[in-house]
């Protein structure tokens, strides 16, 4: 079975393709998940989670590979959400794997190593950066390779560099193993099965992949329809993702801020409950010597240590002379202020000093100071009468919020980009096989249409029908309308060609009749016009065989010469019968009149040319009529042209006309023998005749004799030559 029949058979079953591709994707997802579980179960430093989407991309093209890579990570993300964020890495690798498989890279050894490098750069390089953005690297982050760990510890490599190199090396090993296994599995699968699962054949166009590439390349422009579709969908998806991302981030940021405010408020309320209002003045005056001061301070330390987000806890009393410190806990970097000391008002609360002095409440403030980015909350501590005795200050660190925001943006980007690439790939595939491939295929089939003969026209129609486009939409309607139009056009062309052939045949016959009437006036036979035409064709064909003259003696030129030959003496219609049929030698005056048949013929044919839109072979007919009595040495008539000044068709006709006149009986002479006539042609080469044409004519003596002896009753141009 040839390739074309195989395509036809596959295209008949194209509706079964979705089930096959769905099965392929499910197998791919299963392979990835199993590989991941094997790596986890044996505590391997590898992933082994790329065999599925690599194999799917190689067999089914990049789109199934993208789907497998993305959903494999989403499914494994159900147990560990971190896996979902790496879907973008799998998607990018699947795209590269599909492209490299389509180009045939994996059939060569260097292609395997190139694939390992590319996949490792994506998985280890981009994946390592993604890990850093999500979780960060620090000195406690484990490095798989001991030599990198040592280089990090002795300062040769930074923490970031050591972790990135470790990620790259792990991925090189992982992708080398996974790609080798994948290529082996793909090779085991029979080619017929691979074709069934391939998305490249998911369409009903009877064109090979090479033909589709040719159509895509031939009809693509600087901004092709494919590029416009991708650009439109891409911009739309990016805009949607951006808007959604901004909204999500804004909501996340507000939620996080409210969460921290709520936490700060709750901690402040807790501390306010610990500090007894009636003992505040004693704490201010005696500090650690006051009763319960150390106990309360210990409780405050415990509260602070309950959450890593709580940076500072302090208790201040606002008086007109400044801020009096009741409690100010020490930190690793900043020692606390001793109780009883007076400090300046925090810059963030200077505008609220009057409110604080009067015991009012103030809103939390976010401040970026030398101590860090902090959410500062003041909670009043009131006595039994409701008077504000002091304020509890709780500063929540916002540095973790910054990190969480960066991690959140990274997660959003990773999830959205993987989804966007998958949607773009799906859109491009839909556009390719539902729009671009059918349109380009129709254009290619139409472009290959040949109008040379009826068989070519029929083959063109059959080629168009074999596309058998079934998209179920406007493209299918366009295809059927296009095919119907072409069929009708071909039928119309066939009818026109038949009528043209009939008209041409009638025209040629009329010309023959006209030429025969002209020749019969000087008692010549109809054989003269046919034999001269046969001699003309013989000379042209012989010259056509010579490589150096092949471009001159084209089929069109030969046909024009042969069809023109009967009209070479049309001008004799203006010569009187007494001169034409005079048995003896013409007088000088009579010969002068006889010579005017050349210019008369030129004028007759020129007038005909003026009346038609296309002159066709009439141009050569005019040349023959006017110049067939010119001689190579310039002694001919009517214009005395010489050499190549004489049109080629007239030089050919000169030999044919003279030779036939020599071997034919005329009222004024007996026929010459064939040998005598041929010797005259040879002797006059370079004088009367073009020497090259005369030599060719003489060299074809056997064929010339056959024409001379023949009874000419057939067409002017031999059938085998005209075809």
Image (cartoon, helix red, strand yellow):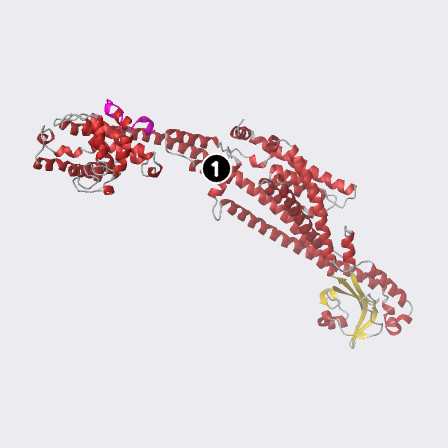
Seen in the picture, residue 552 relative to 387 is either above or below; the reply is: above
Residue nearest the viewer, comparing 63 with 79:
63
Residue at position x 69%, y 49% from top? Answer: 124
Indicate the quadrant containing the N terminus: top left, top right, bottom left or bottom right.
Answer: top right
Residue 632 falls in image quadrant: top left
Q: Does the magenta stretch include residue 540?
A: no
> Horizontally, is 384 left or right of 476 in the view?
right
Task: Identify which residue, 381 or 209, lies in the foreground.
Answer: 209
Would residue 388 be visible to someone looking at this image? no
Task: Say which element carries label 1.
Answer: helix
Q: Quadrant of residue 588?
A: top left
719 is within the stretch colored magenta: yes
x, y (%) of residue 509? 23, 27
Q: Is residue 80 shown left or right of residue 288?
A: left
Which residue shows up at 47% across the image and 46% down it?
221
Residue underneath mark 1: 441
The percent position of residue 247, horizontal first and vertical second, equals 63, 54
Q: Position of residue 327 (x, y in %)?
A: 84, 68
Residue 621 sits above or below residue 354 on the image:
above
For the C terminus, the image quarter is top left
Q: Can the viewer see residue 429 in this picture?
A: yes
Give coordinates of residue 714: x percent, y percent.
26, 24
Q: What stretch is highlighted in magenta?
A: 706-723
How dense is the environment of label 1, judged by Cα within 10 Å: few (below 14), some, or many (20 and up)? many
What is the residue that sits farthest to the bottom in this orientation?
A: 321
Report the label total.
Answer: 1
Horizontal side, residue 315 vs residue 612: left or right: right
């Amino acid at each position: 079975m040839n390739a074309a029949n195989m395509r036809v058979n596959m295209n008949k079953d194209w509706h079964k393709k979705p089930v096959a591709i769905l099965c392929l994707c499910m197998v791919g997802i299963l392979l990835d998940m199993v590989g991941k579980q094997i790596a986890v179960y044996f505590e391997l430093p590898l992933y082994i989670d790329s065999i599925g989407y690599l194999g799917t991309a190689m067999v089914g093209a990049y789109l199934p590979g993208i789907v497998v890579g993305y959903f494999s990570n989403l499914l494994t993300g159900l147990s560990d959400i971190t896996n979902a964020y790496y879907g973008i890495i799998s998607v990018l690798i699947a795209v590269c794997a599909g492209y490299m498989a389509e180009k045939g890279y994996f059939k060569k050894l260097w292609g395997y190593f190139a694939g390992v490098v590319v996949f490792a750069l994506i998985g280890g390089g981009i994946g390592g950066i993604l890990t850093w953005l999500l979780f960060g690297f620090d000195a406690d982050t484990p490095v798989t390779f001991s030599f990198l760990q040592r280089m990090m510890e002795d300062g040769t490599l930074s923490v970031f560099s050591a972790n990135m190199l470790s990620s790259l090396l792990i991925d090189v090993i992982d992708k080398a193993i996974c790609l080798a296994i994948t290529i082996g599995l793909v090779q085991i699968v029979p080619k017929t099965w691979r074709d069934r699962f391939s998305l490249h054949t998911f369409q009903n166009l009877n064109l090979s992949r090479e033909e589709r590439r040719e159509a895509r390349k031939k009809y693509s422009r600087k901004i092709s329809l494919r590029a416009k579709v991708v650009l439109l969908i891409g911009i739309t998806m990016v805009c949607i993702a951006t808007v959604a991302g901004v909204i999500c981030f804004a909501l996340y940021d507000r939620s996080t801020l409210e969460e921290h405010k709520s936490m700060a408020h709750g901690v402040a309320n807790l501390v306010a409950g610990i500090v007894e209002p009636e003992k505040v003045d004693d704490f201010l005056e005696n500090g650690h010597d006051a009763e319960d001061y150390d106990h309360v301070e210990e409780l405050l330390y415990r509260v602070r240590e309950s959450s890593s987000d709580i940076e500072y806890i302090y208790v201040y009393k606002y008086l007109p002379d400044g801020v009096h410190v009741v409690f100010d806990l020490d930190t690793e970097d900043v020692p606390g202020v001793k109780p009883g000391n007076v400090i300046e008002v925090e810059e963030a609360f200077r505008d609220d000093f009057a409110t604080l002095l009067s015991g009012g409440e103030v809103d939390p403030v976010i401040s970026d100071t030398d101590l860090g980015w902090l959410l500062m909350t003041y909670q009043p501590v009131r006595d039994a009468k409701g008077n504000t005795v002091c304020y509890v200050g709780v500063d929540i660190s916002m540095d973790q919020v910054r990190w969480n925001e960066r991690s959140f943006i990274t997660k959003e980007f990773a999830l959205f980009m993987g989804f966007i690439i998958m949607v773009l790939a799906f859109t491009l595939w839909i556009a390719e096989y539902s729009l671009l491939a059918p349109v380009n295929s129709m254009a290619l089939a139409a472009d290959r249409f040949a109008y040379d003969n009826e068989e070519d026209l029929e083959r063109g129609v059959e080629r168009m029908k074999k596309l058998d486009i079934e998209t179920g939409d406007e493209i299918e309607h366009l295809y059927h309308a296009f095919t119907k139009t072409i069929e009708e056009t071909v039928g119309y062309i066939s009818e026109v060609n038949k009528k043209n052939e009939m008209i041409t045949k009638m025209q040629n016959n009329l010309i023959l009749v006209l030429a025969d009437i002209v020749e019969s006036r000087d008692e010549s036979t109809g054989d003269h016009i046919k034999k001269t035409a046969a001699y003309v064709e013989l000379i042209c064909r012989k010259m056509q065989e010579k490589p150096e003259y092949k471009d001159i003696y084209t089929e069109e030129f030969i046909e024009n010469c042969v069809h023109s030959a009967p009209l070479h003496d049309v001008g004799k219609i203006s010569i009187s019968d007494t001169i034409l049929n005079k048995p003896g030698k013409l007088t000088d005056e009579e010969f002068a009149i006889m010579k005017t048949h050349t210019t008369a013929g030129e004028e007759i044919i020129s007038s005909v040319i003026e009346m038609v839109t296309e002159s066709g072979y009439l141009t050569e007919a005019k040349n023959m009529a006017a110049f067939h009595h010119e001689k190579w040495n310039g002694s001919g008539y009517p214009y005395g042209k010489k050499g190549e000044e004489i049109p080629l068709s007239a030089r050919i006709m000169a030999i044919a006309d003279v030779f036939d006149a020599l071997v034919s009986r005329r009222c004024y002479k007996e026929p010459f023998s064939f040998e005598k006539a041929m010797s005259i042609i040879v002797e006059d080469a370079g004088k009367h005749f073009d020497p090259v044409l005369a030599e060719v004519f003489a060299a074809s003596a056997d064929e010339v004799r056959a024409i001379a002896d023949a009874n000419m009753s057939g067409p002017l141009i031999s059938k085998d030559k005209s075809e």
